[in-house]
Amino acid sequence: MIIRKKALYAIVESYPYQAKEYLEMALLDKSESIRNLGIYYLKQRGVQEFTHYYMHALNSLGAKPHLLLGLSAVGSKKDFGTISLLIDRYPGLQAALIVVAYKLRPDDWQNIIRDILRSPDASKLNAFANCLINTPESYSFSEMTDLIYGRENALRLRYFLKIINKVNYGRWRVLNFILDELIYYKDKECKLLIENYLLHWIFHNSPTKSFIRLSKDESLELNDKLNKVIALNPNCLIYERLKENIQCFSYT
């Protein structure tokens, strides 16, 4: 990809009058950065509308993930109806469809995404997680949890943790949710994933930082939940470290 990018730069600099053809080809590249580079230079040449490039490619080449992702960056909600007809013929493109629906926002975009995630795989969950991390205001914590989280489902849990690592849903709200759920976990892989997340939480919520402290009632509630988890996992020092951390944020 780096070589192709350098080649495109060289064509633009050395053959500016012949470069448009190559920039139009760049719009259809599998690399997002090269597609963006093509858009940037074509805009400098007065091109402002790019949807027709992708619509023509989708009709002539078929529905391919990189073409759908390219369209999602330049299209609008009215374009979704056309591409949804194409996607019906290509069921393997549903991860790309999540991105397109998320960015183009057809009227029923959240239902489209929900239906796709009823039978998730890593590509679908990753597509949704990346979209949400980039525009976190689209889903509340409860909406995201309802859509992504699955108790003792390692696949769903990985992407749930990826999201809460990147999106600020409120440290205490997230921690309360995690502790509520931990008492039900028996699967070792899932518990290890959560414990790794808690190590991350402890590291990024240092008592030396100026954070909102817990009220007395909040502190008692959180400690009660944590004590239940510790009782179920007496040999895991992570929970003891977490307890020490939380006490630094509590009013005494």
Image: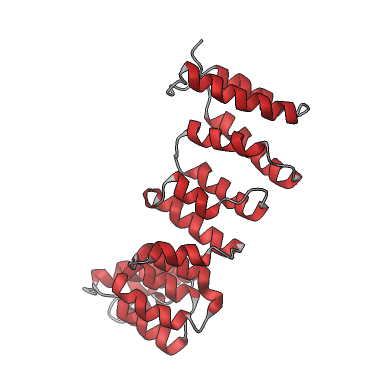
Quick check: 148 above or below 246?
Answer: below
Q: Residue furthest left?
A: 46
Picture quadrant where residue 15 is located: bottom left
At horizontal 54% and vertical 33% (from top left) the residue drawn is: 176
Choose between 172 and 181: the one closer to the eye. 181
Quick check: 111 above or below 166?
Answer: below
Quick check: 80 above or below 86?
Answer: above
Q: How many labels were placed on the picture? A: 0
Q: Is residue 29 visible?
A: no
At horizontal 76% and vertical 44% (from top left) the residue drawn is: 188
Q: Residue furthest top?
A: 252
Q: Percent position (x, y) of residue 199?
A: 63, 33
At horizontal 55% and vertical 19% (from top left) the residue drawn is: 220
At horizontal 52% and vertical 20% (from top left) the residue drawn is: 219
With 214 as the anchor, is 41 left or right in this view? left
Q: How is the image coloured?
A: secondary structure
Choose between 176 and 26: the one closer to the eye. 176
Q: Percent position (x, y) of residue 175?
A: 55, 33
Q: Percent position (x, y) of residue 222?
A: 56, 25
Q: Percent position (x, y) of residue 171?
A: 49, 33
